[in-house]
Image (cartoon, rainbow, N blue to C red):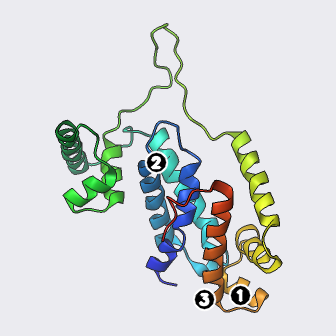
Amino acid sequence: MDRKELIEQNLGLVHACANRFRGRGIEYEELYSAGCLGLVKAADGFREELGFAFSTYAVPAVLGEIRRLFRDGGAVKVSRSLKERSREVVKLSEKLTKENGKEPTVTELSKILGIDCFAVSELLNISLPPVSLTASNDDKERQTDVPVPSGEDAIQDKLALEEVLKTLPEKERKLITLRYFKGLTQSATAERLGMSQVQVSRKERAVLLAMRKKLTGDFSQLAT
């Protein structure tokens, strides 16, 4: 499977990861863009001969880029040229906000600048101010809340996933189990199930889309 297919077939992972951080102060499109950057990095570094599934390798990279939006802000050291480019993007965003009465999306900026959404997201993130964990508020209390993943969310997600798995036909359930719980590659899964790698790839995508529907009931963010 080539790099493009690897990325396209795993965009659902990015949506799943980004959804976990909704409502925490960063727009969903930015979360998704950061997650896509992680997916691209994972695709560039993945080696199938290592013997585990791409999703196993990709999820930490996707979550890492999303969490970086919260954790690092503008505190990461970057080159002067990137800082200058970042300021240009921010000025453009501010200009469009004044002209249109609303902040432009990453996609809109991407089309105007002629660069992809990943690059726009990174340039905007460079300009974010760092957050002090000991900053004083109006009551002179030195505390800043930093968003962290909820343990309860993880438990609820696990229980919901187990319930959805129970509703799948036996062969589809085994396919998902081999791919995402046993960490087998599509080729190894195909051998176990007596299918071709192409059949596994198509069936896996269809099953994941069906599972997402049952878990969220939201088709608006599904990749076509």
SS category of the residue bearing label 3? helix
Residue at 36% x, 58% y is: 118
Find out whether the residues at labels 3 and 1 contact each other: C-beta distance under 8 Å.
Answer: no
Which residue is identified by label 1? Answer: 190
Amino acid type, callout 3: Val
- Would you place residue 116 above or below residue 54 in this image? above
- Residue at image position (63%, 54%) is 216
- Image vertical order of residue 19 relative to residue 13, above or below: above
Three-letter code for the amino acid on which mark 1 is drawn: Ala
- Of pointers 2 and 1, the one earlier in the residue sequence: 2
User: Is tag 3's residue or tag 2's residue first in the polypeptide sequence?
Assistant: 2
- Percent x, y of residue 141: 52, 11
Q: Residues within 10 Å of mark 1 (few under 14, many from 20)?
A: some
Closer-to-camera residue (163/13): 163
**Residue drawn at (23%, 39%) of the image:** 97
> Distance of mark 3 from mark 1, alpha carbons?
9 Å
Q: Which residue is mark 3?
A: 198
Tell me the number on the disc at residue 28.
2
User: Mark 2 near mark 1, Cβ–Cβ under 8 Å?
Assistant: no
- Looking at numbered disc 2 in the image, what kind of residue is underneath it? Tyr
Residue 108 occupies quadrant: bottom left
Q: CA distance from mark 3 to mark 2?
A: 32 Å
Q: Crowding at label 2, few (<14), some or many (≥20) Cα neighbours within 10 Å? A: some
Secondary structure state at the residue bearing disc 1: helix
Rendered residue at 73%/72% (across/down): 176
